[in-house]
Image (tube, rainbow, N blue to C red):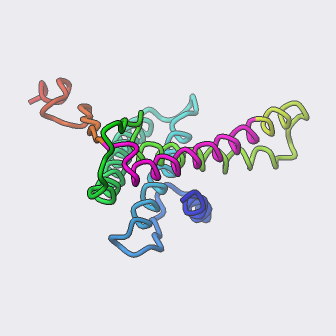
Amino acid sequence: MFALFERQIVDYHKTDSVDAPMHNPYEDGTFENVLWEKSHIDTVQWHLEDLIRPEDVDPVEALRLKRWIDRSNQRRTDMVERIDDYYMQQFASVEVRPDAKINTETPAWAIDRLSILALKIYHFGIEVARKDVSAEQHERCEAKYKTLLEQKADLMQAIDDLLKELSTGQKKMKLYRQMKMYNDPSLNPMLYNKK
């Protein structure tokens, strides 16, 4: 899974453009296709957030980017829920043990964190390789990079453990949808009061 995220991030950076179309190498309907799209959404959003950060960004452009980020956040949540639907289906026939517990997060939200972690590792790798920085900055970046790699190993192990526990009924899967209100014109007062 992490290798797929890495490939998608490298593929994005061939153009390094938020406007470039996604080239998903996996067949529609496959789990890998969903993971690739999810990673692409995260990668584009990472760069949208970079574009909006400069103090001198044009206010009209900043608003356009903010709206794009909002739509991206909704798509990201929708993709996480699709991944969880996949796992719900995978584990639907598992006999859950009476003492099974619920995990603090679903597999998909852990995978979401892994996707973001892949982006951090990629970008910190660039910072570690820079030659135009002080020795102190290089040391700070290298220490953070090593921590991110440790976090990657831990998170991948935790995801593997969770999937195994779900597949053997040691843990039970329960979904709560995010129920975001900010994009829903029937639930966000700033939108429904405009009517």
Query: Horizontally, is 73 left or right of 85 in the view?
Result: right
Q: Position of residue 128 (x, y in %)?
A: 80, 45
Location of residue 60 with respect to 129 vertically, above or below: above
Residue 44 shown left or right of residue 69 in the figure: right
Magenta highlight on residue 69? no
Question: For the N terminus, which image quadrant?
Answer: bottom right
Nearest the camera: 42 or 189?
42
Residue 88 against residue 64 in the figure, above or below:
below
Residue in view at x 53 percent, y 51 percent: 160
Which residue shows up at 31% across the image and 55% down it? 94
Quarter in which the C terminus is drawn: top left
Instruction: Tell me: residue 38, above or below residue 21.
Output: above
**What secondary structure predominates along the stretch shown in magenta?**
helix
Q: Position of residue 133 (x, y in %)?
A: 85, 38
Give percent across and percent down for residue 116: 54, 45
Residue 146 sits in which quadrant? top right
Q: Would residue 44 be found to the left or right of residue 3 on screen?
A: left
Within the magenta stretch, is there residue 168?
A: yes
In front here: 35 or 157? 157
Closer to the camera in the image, 72 or 16: 72
Q: Which residues are magenta?
A: 144-173
Q: Viewed as shown, does residue 47 lie left or right of 133? A: left
Query: From this viewpoint, which residue is outermost toward the left?
Result: 195
Image coords of residue 136 (percent x, y) = 88, 30
Q: Residue at x 55, y 44 (%)?
A: 158
